[in-house]
Amino acid sequence: MPKMEILQIPVLSDNYVYLVHGNASGQTGVVDPAVAGPVLAALKDKGWTLTHVLNTHHHGDHTGGNMELKAATGCTIVGPRADAARIPGIDVQVGDGDVFNLGGQKATIFDVPGHTRGHVAYWFQDAEALFCGDTLFALGCGRLFEGSPAQMWNSLQKFLALPDATRVYCAHEYTQQNARFALTVEPDNRNLVARAAQIDALRRKGVPTVPSTIGEERATNPFLRPDSEDLQQILGLSGAQVVEVLAETRRRKDIF
């Protein structure tokens, strides 16, 4: 049995909430609980006791269940130090370079602003699991609501430095639409073409496309590939700075 068990819970229209359970300690965290009901039901089904909420950022579809879960379980709420004032019920503030210990399972914290000004990600190295909220998606990245393209690129580079086998547990099932856009800016990327076909097949069966891996994203996600000559040529930005390429890619996705 693995030391850390991850349970993916689909909620709302396209959100994913994750239960993270340490088999040795019995401690259980929930990542970005949009709503409490499905989380409490899953905990009961598994026989687990919730000890922590791990928030990546302040948006309501990531924190909406915080207070109900805290009232029901007495759990500790962990969230970004840079945006603590907007995290309901926050008890523990974390930031870049911190290590959070969930019952012996250690998560390195990354500050990854761009989508919001105070966004964090949790990387459980031993479990090869990255919980990145809305900064990185399968074949996409978050909208720049509160940050700049330069901030987003700096954040995405932190993920690019992780091992290819790292599983990317993003917070939304956006992959099929992201793939359709990605093909407009890198139509000759054979890895992307093959992956898009696989995604279509999975969604026809109602199967999640998440998690992906850093390796898959490195090869196919245009927001991680602003140095791609083919991408730059399609955008009319051959030889441009990577931040400029990322900004134009995000602009096009926003109106896609």
Image (cartoon, rainbow, N blue to C red):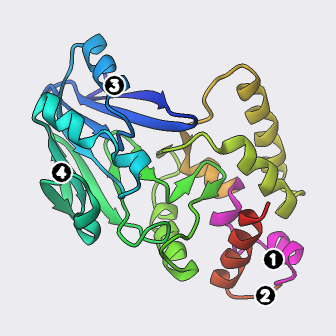
Q: Which residue is nearer to you in this view: 250 or 182?
A: 250
Vertical comparison of 75 with 107: above or below: above
Is most of the magenta stretch helix, strand or loop? helix
Query: Magenta segment range?
Result: 220-237
Q: How far apart, in angstroms, are the residues tagged by discs 2 and 4?
A: 47 Å
Q: Is residue 114 left or right of residue 94?
A: right
Q: Position of residue 134 (x, y in %)?
A: 49, 55
For badge 4, the amino acid type reads: Gly
- Number of marks in the rendered image: 4
The answer to which image quadrant residue 50 occupies is top left
For badge 1, the amino acid type reads: Gln
Q: Which residue is mark 1?
A: 232
For badge 2, the amino acid type reads: Gly
The answer to which image quadrant residue 73 occupies is top left
Whether 223 is among the magenta residues is yes
Dots 2, 1 in contact, CB < 8 A: yes
For badge 3, the amino acid type reads: Gly
Q: Which residue is mark 3?
A: 37
Q: Is residue 129 left or right of residue 217?
A: left
Of mark 3 and mark 2, the one earlier in the sequence is 3
Of mark 3 and mark 1, the one earlier in the sequence is 3
